[in-house]
Image: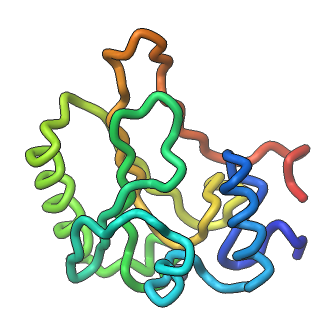
Amino acid sequence: MSQNKNNFINVNNARADEQIEVMQKIADESHCPFCEENLRLYHKNPILKDGKYWLVTKNQWPYEHTKHHFLLIYKEHAAVLSDLAAEAGSELFTMIKELEKEYKFEGGGFSMRFGDTDFSAGTVNHLHVQLVIPDAMAKDFEPVKIKLGLQWDRRK
Ligand SMILES: [Zn+2]
């Protein structure tokens, strides 16, 4: 397995320079940055909600052209969908519905990558939902893109 990719991290999928630096450090530590005991080491944004299955926070490196970019992070280490408790889906939707109300979302979308990070294009291989509200009223707005899969020439 390469240095940039291990069971927990795929630095090849990182976007911002600072994110690449932090992710490289995490890769060297060989632990999962989204497991609760490590999250506080790297993640600087406050936890907005703490459920039985999910934590809600904001992405430290929001996608370009987003008004809000939340992360809903599964509280146990999980990398594939089969790892999820069935009731976790219900709590996930409840939390997203609450956020919709609290932040008065005009519209947006969410995605959850899973499994092998060459396929998912995830940076952290611990199940989390990206909930994105695009900044669609901004003058310089461009559509927010969510990527799946990593091209061959970026795999190290
Ligand atoms: Zn984890």
Depth check: give the residue in front, 29 or 118. Answer: 29
**Total number of numbered labels?**
0
Position of the N terminus, as image quadrant, is bottom right
Above or below, 150 relative to 90: above
Give percent across and percent down for residue 100: 15, 45
- Foreground of the two, 18 or 37: 18
Q: Quadrant of residue 69?
A: top left
Q: How is the image coloured?
A: rainbow
Say whether residue 33 is left or right of residue 69.
right
Residue located at (47% from left, 79% from top): 40
Which quadrant holds residue 28? Answer: bottom right
Check the image and report above or below for 69 versus 71: above
Horizontal and vertical percent for residue 39? 49, 78
Measuring 42% from the left and 49% from the top, which residue is drawn there?
111
81 versus 130 height, above or below: below
Q: What residue appears at the point 53 percent right and 84 percent down from the top-left corner?
A: 38
Q: Is residue 127 left or right of residue 54?
A: right
- Tell me: residue 27, above or below residue 92: below
Q: Position of residue 89 (x, y in %)?
A: 25, 67
Going by the picture, which residue comes out furthest to the top?
Answer: 139
Q: Residue 14: image x %, image y %?
A: 69, 53
Return the residue nearer the eye: 59 or 116: 59
Which quarter of the rendered picture does the C terminus lie within?
bottom right
Residue at coordinates 90% horizontally, 71% vertically from top-left? 2
Q: Nearer the viewer, residue 120 or 135?
A: 135
